[in-house]
């Protein structure tokens, strides 16, 4: 099965002020849950803003992302499937 790419927006008050140890703990918790869920979901990276994170995941479907959020305790406020990607090289022929 091919995994699809998703962006998960998580509302987490003051996450942008978290210290490195707090972020390390959050990453460890996420990794623990991902290991439980198996190969149908992968965390690629996350971007931390003031009161939100934007996480890039590969997953079989939205349901497994919601399951990860439920088990980990990290909210999945909005889940958006990425349909296509562009970058500066897209303009070149």
Image: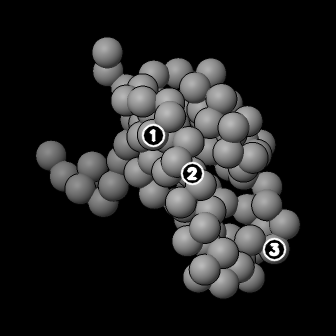
Q: State whether residue 56 appears in this view.
A: no
- Tell which of 34 and 42 is nearer to you: 34
- Count residues near mark 3 (Cα–Cα under 10 Å), then give few for <14, some for 14-19, many for 20+: few
11 to the left or right of 18: right
3 vs 2, front mark:
2
**What residue sits right under mark 1 in the picture?**
35
Please, what secondary structure does the residue beneath circle 2 have? Answer: helix
89 to the left or right of 61: left
Residue 8 falls in which quadrant of the image?
top right
Please, what secondary structure does the residue beneath circle 3 have? Answer: loop
Q: How is the image coloured?
A: one colour
Q: Residue at x 62, y 36 (%)?
A: 68
Q: CA distance from mark 2 to mark 1?
A: 9 Å
Relative to 51, residue 1 above or below: above
**What residue sits right under mark 2 in the picture?**
30
Q: State whether residue 67 appears in this view.
A: yes
**What residue sits right under mark 3 in the picture?**
14
Relative to 23, residue 57 above or below: above
């Amino acid at each position: 099965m091919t995994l699809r790419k998703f962006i998960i927006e998580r509302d987490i008050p003051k996450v942008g002020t978290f210290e490195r140890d707090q972020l390390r703990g959050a990453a460890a918790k996420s990794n623990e849950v991902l290991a439980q869920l198996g190969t149908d979901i992968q965390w690629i990276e996350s971007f931390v803003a003031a009161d939100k994170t934007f996480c890039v995941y590969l997953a079989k479907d939205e349901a497994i992302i919601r399951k990860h959020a439920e088990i980990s305790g990290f909210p999945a406020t909005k889940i958006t499937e990425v349909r296509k990607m562009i970058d500066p090289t897209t303009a070149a022929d």
